[in-house]
Image: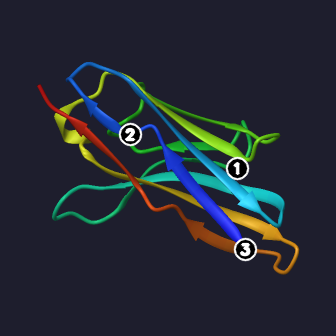
């Protein structure tokens, strides 16, 4: 069993900041990939940021320079620091991980999502 739990969403004014967290737990041996995706109402889910190692990081063009992804391998946790938030960042944010468990070399899991609303 693997659990993926996000936290940190909420309501923030334009220009404000939020930090999302995603913790993976269960029979984990290795976390290969950790990523954040978002889905706004009526739109398709899109990649926001992802990382495998500290030197392999990707950002959507729309968040470059404003968002920072990081991970704490000791805690199996990935963070998304979001600064200078805009109304168009409003969406449900989902954590996605690719892990090695006791039973599988590669399994992909999604979190339940956390809502981010940017509004004055």
x%, y% of residue 109? 60, 69
- SS at circle 1: loop
Q: Is residue 66 visible?
A: no
Distance between the Cα atoms at labels 1 and 2?
23 Å
Disc 3 and disc 2 in contact, CB within 8 angstroms: no
Q: Residues within 10 Å of mark 1 (few under 14, many from 20)?
A: some
Relative depth, front residue between 52 and 14:
14
| Quarter of the image that includes the C terminus | top left
Q: Which mark is residue 52?
A: 1
Of the numbered discs 3 and 2, the one sitting upstream in the chain is: 3
- The residue carrying mark 2 is 9
Question: In x, y percent, where is residue 74?
Answer: 82, 40
Q: Regarding mark 3 in the picture, which secondary structure is present there? A: loop
**Residue 106 shown left or right of residue 46 in the figure:** right
Instruction: Give the label on residue 1, or none.
Output: 3
Q: Position of residue 45 (x, y in %)?
A: 34, 63
Relative vertical location of residue 106 with respect to residue 81 in this rendering, above or below:
below
Sequence-first tag of 3 and 1: 3
Q: Secondary structure at mark 2?
A: loop
């Amino acid at each position: 069993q693997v659990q993926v739990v996000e936290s940190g969403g909420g309501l923030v004014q334009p220009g404000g900041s939020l930090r999302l967290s995603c913790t993976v737990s269960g029979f984990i041996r290795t976390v290969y990939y950790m990523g954040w995706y978002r889905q706004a109402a009526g739109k398709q889910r899109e990649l926001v940021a992802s990382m495998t190692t500290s030197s392999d990081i990707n950002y959507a063009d729309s968040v470059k320079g404003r968002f920072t992804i990081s991970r704490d391998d000791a805690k199996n946790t990935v963070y998304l620091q979001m600064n200078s938030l805009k109304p168009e960042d409003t969406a449900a944010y989902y954590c996605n991980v690719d892990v090695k468990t006791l039973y599988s070399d590669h399994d992909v899991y999604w979190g339940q999502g956390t809502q981010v609303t940017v509004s004055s």
